[in-house]
Image (cartoon, rainbow, N blue to C red):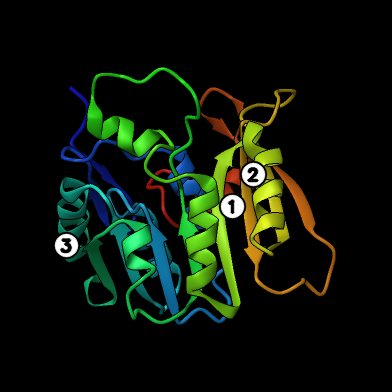
Amino acid sequence: MSNPFFQFKQFTIRHDKCAMKVGTDGVLLGAWAGIESCNRILDIGTGTGLIAMMLAQRSKAVIDAIDIDAEACLQAQENAESSPFAERIKIQHSALSDFAQTDTGLYDLIVSNPPYFVDSLKCPDQKRNTARHTDTLTLEDLLQDSRKLLAPQGRIALILPYDQKERLTDCIRTQNLFLSKETSVIPVPGAEPKRLLAELTAEPPVFPTFSSQLTIEIARHQYTDEYVSLTKDFYLKM
């Protein structure tokens, strides 16, 4: 049986009631997303609340976190309430399409580790399917509704499978967004990129898109200096 919780330096994430457990993708996005001038943040598909709490640790922003899964919201609420950031995090059980219709105001930063399996076989666990497959939230819908909620100077930060890069480019163009920063995530030296961290803006960036690479490990459990630098404020043993 897997451990029902994951201990970080400043907070604990319980994930025994949540379809998707704590993983590298969420940690990467929570540590990578730009927080400059952020007063209001929205976390879409919050799951355990991990990314919301990482951003609360890194900033003074007020954070709304939504998820379509009621049990995930209960888990995220439990995690947020036991954290030092409870007063700044609000968990809401809502689909993004519904949330975008409410009078919620605009956000300086919108983050999401969205469903990512497209046209692939599903497992028998419906909750896990909802968290992993794009049936309930396509990339197109995610960007369309996020665009409505984004402040003029705001940013959208995502982590996606690298093979979705071309699709992301098409969606950005359709929604009149701009790619300001991207990082290709490579598991070990010499491997192909597995993930793409992307930052989008509503206004054309002043400078050309900043592109970089991040390699996670040199060998099994031997992390690169870049990965340690990015995550050391969170992982206990970094």
Residue 137 spot, x, y in % from top left = 42, 46
**Residue at 29 percent of width and 76 percent of height:** 88
Q: Up-down: is 138 above or below 53?
A: above
In percent of width and height, residue 147 lies at 55, 67
Residue contact at pointers 3 and 2, CB within 8 angstroms: no
Q: CA distance from mark 3 to mark 1?
A: 26 Å
The residue beneath circle 3 is: 82
Position of residue 135 measured from the top left corner of the image (x, y, whole percent) = 40, 37
| SS label for mark 1 | helix
The residue lying at 71 percent from left, 26 percent from top is 189
Going from N to C along the chain, the mark reached first, 3 or 1, is 3
Distance in Å between CA atoms under marks 1 and 2:
6 Å
| Rendered image: mark on residue 225 | 2
- Counting labels gives 3
Q: Is residue 229 above or below residue 217?
A: below
Read off the residue under disc 1.
229
Dividing the picture into quadrants, the one containing residue 57 is bottom left
Mark 3 is surrounded, within 10 Å at the Cα level, by few (under 14), some (14 to 19) or many (20 or more) other residues, namely few
Q: Amino acid at mark 3?
A: Ser
